Image: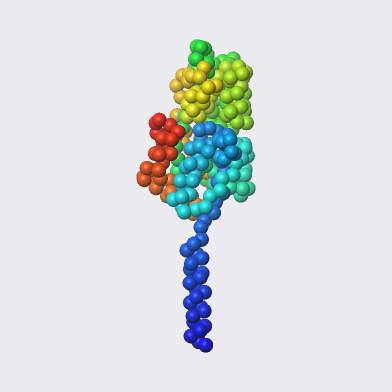
Amino acid sequence: MQNYKKLLLAAAATLVFSANALAVDKYTVGIEGAYPPFNNKNASGEVVGFDPDIAMALCAKMKADCTIVTSDWDGIIPSLIAGKFDFVVSSQSITPERLEAVDFTNPYYSNKQQFIAPKNVDFKTDKADLKGKTIGTQRATQAATWLEDNLGSDITLKLYDTQENAYADLVAGRVDALLADKYANFDWLKSKDGQPYEFKGEPVNDDDKVGISLKKGNTVLKDKLNGALKEIVDDGTYKKINDKYFPFSIY
């Protein structure tokens, strides 16, 4: 009987060990899903783009089971704080204001903003020439902050819930120009709608770093994400994803 009990205990211990060994971390990843080429929905409703590709590569390195959930841009940080996501991979700039509410990983790419306007318009981007212009941008972005801080009441500022709606108003002639992330503009300018437009002036705010946001104090997950990010950069996975969307490095 004593030997039988020992066998049962050993078997139970083996089962517990096996269950722990097979346990997989599960995470929900927040992404806007309306910001090509970084994140967008295809015809099937699947979220595609640079951000989900990076997110899935990180999850593979962490050996984690990840599910992507979309959110409106304005609500993405409140949803993270409310626990709807474990972390957000959605082209978020690391700003002092956001750092008051959430933590960020190391940057996974560097960003800058640049004006676009019609090719057939002599559009200058110095403050004197921009005075009186109507400029569009997506709300709650670095571009919006830069316009508010640097041009203020000198321009008429139009804010949009998505970058796609901002592009639509540019095409419709409701704004003189847009200021947006250079790499999003780069992608749109290649489209049919974007052909009559071009970059104007030099980029602004060219030290903009983009990171993965997560709840304050979650150092375990932050360390895992930073470690996975280093791995995908070191082993060439990051470059493969980068080259899929851009003919230059954005890291």
Count of all numbered marks drawn on residues in the image: 0
**Residue at the outermost front position:** 44
Residue 168: x and y in percent read 60, 23
- Above/below status of 221 relative to 41: below
Q: Is residue 48 left or right of residue 230?
A: right
Q: Is residue 76 left or right of residue 198?
A: right
Residue 152: x and y in percent read 58, 22
Q: Residue at x 57, y 17 (%)?
A: 176
Q: Residue at x 52, y 52 (%)?
A: 65
Q: Residue at x 48, y 72 (%)?
A: 14
Residue 23 vs residue 250, the one in the foreground = 23
Q: Residue at x 61, y 40 (%)?
A: 71
**Residue at the outermost bottom position:** 1
Residue 206: x and y in percent read 45, 29
The quadrant in which the C terminus is found is top left
Residue 164 shows in the view: yes
